[in-house]
Amino acid sequence: MSRTLWTDEQGVVRTIDQTVLPFERREIALRSPDDCDRAIREMQVRGAPLIGAVGAYGLALALRADPSDASLEHACERLAAARPTAVNLRWALGRVRRRVAAAPSARRAALAWDEAGRICDEDVACNERIGTHGARLLRDLAARRSGRAGALQLLTHCNAGRIATVDYGTALAPIYRLHAEGFPVHVWVDETRPRNQGAALTAWELAERGVAHTVIADNAGGLLMMQGRVDAVIVGCDRVAANGDVANKVGTYLKALAARDNGVPFYVACPVSTIDPDTPDGASIPIEERAAREVTHLSGILDDGSRATVRVVPAGSAVANPAFDITPARLVTALVTERGVCDASAGGLRAVLEADAR
Ligand code: MRU
């Protein structure tokens, strides 16, 4: 595929500004920790693995400017606070910090830069393996389908594709794999209000790769499942607690409930770095509360191609905007990681965490 985050010979980090997709493909340069922090906070980059990778480069850039202990601590703290729910950001910062902590000041920036590069390379490799394991799972599911021919019907929420990671994606990796093998697959894409990551980003990605898909309003998935038009739900995630509870984009939980009620398997794809053994359960996962404006306003383009943002909520109404929700482990059929498929349970997670990285 092609990477969403890369560096040039001048030591500049480059990525795609996701706030202007799908109507414009604009590359941005991240030259300082401030640039990385802003890109994460303003969601120019988003998706758990990608914000982890950008955070790692942010720390490397901070150490390039000032390699002192104080700078290391300050940059870690600031970048970690940029988005609280996805554990990959904290995980990546911790990895870079451990790499440089004992090194002399003069070596720190180079070590951090290399470590950030390794995090990116590993993300690509992990996601490719998630694709392999997930595709096998979905092919088996398709083989067991009774009474329905035609493309495998999958439903996904938010964007857990190539641009939420360095490449391949998590939930979309198995779909890309199946598509590349010529296996017929069709994706129901939840629009994913309030920021419309499904309508804007997942649809854009799938169209770019020629994967058959249909965008639906967030509330349509339950009916489609009831009508037998969804073979499986597959989503990404931002954090898996030690008991198997999963945090993902708000609205995921409702899809999991509908899936359970209709006997539809509900799969969660993520790299092992998204599993957080230090968080005991879903209730302990911090849920990011975002600006009311994301709910009160919608952005897009007019028929003449110009951009527009319009208010869709009365000015006097109170608004709440929790960005993530928790899907209890009991509603998750299985997790798909780079180390294989496991139960969303303390035992299943332990086994995957202790397994050799293959
Ligand atoms: O707020 P976002 O767009 O960063 O939320 C992203 C999601 O919830 C994704 O599904 C998740 O990070 C998995 S990304 C591979």
Image (tube, rainbow, N blue to C red):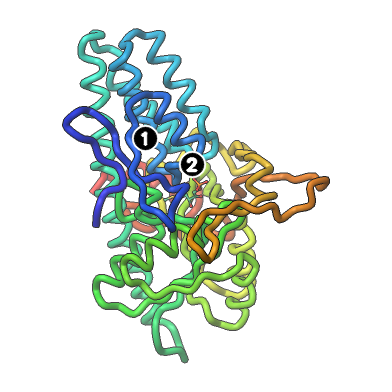
- Where residue 13 appears, as percent x and y from the top left, is 29, 34
| Secondary structure beneath label 1 | helix
Residue farthest to the left?
Answer: 9
> Which residue bears the numbered disc 2?
43
Residue visible at 48% across and 41% down? 43
Which kind of residue does numbered mark 2 sit on? Met
Near-viewer residue (145 or 109): 109
Crowd rating for badge 2 (residues with CA inside 10 Å; few <14, some 14–19, many 20+): some
Q: Residue furthest front?
A: 304
Q: Are marks 1 and 2 in contact (CB under 8 Å)?
A: no
Give the numbered dot on residue 54.
1
Q: Rounded to the nearest whole Å, what is the CA distance between mark 1 and mark 2?
A: 11 Å
The picture places residue 343, in percent across and down from the top left corner, at 46, 56
| Res. 352 in view | no
Q: Of label 1 and label 2, which has the lower sequence position? A: 2
**Is 68 placed above or below 276 here?**
above
Q: Tell me the crowding category of disc 1: few under 14, some 14 to 19, or many 20 or more residues within 10 angstroms, Cα based.
A: many
Q: Quadrant of residue 112?
A: top left
Near-viewer residue (24 or 333): 24
Asked if disc 2 is less than 8 Å from ligand 1, the answer is yes
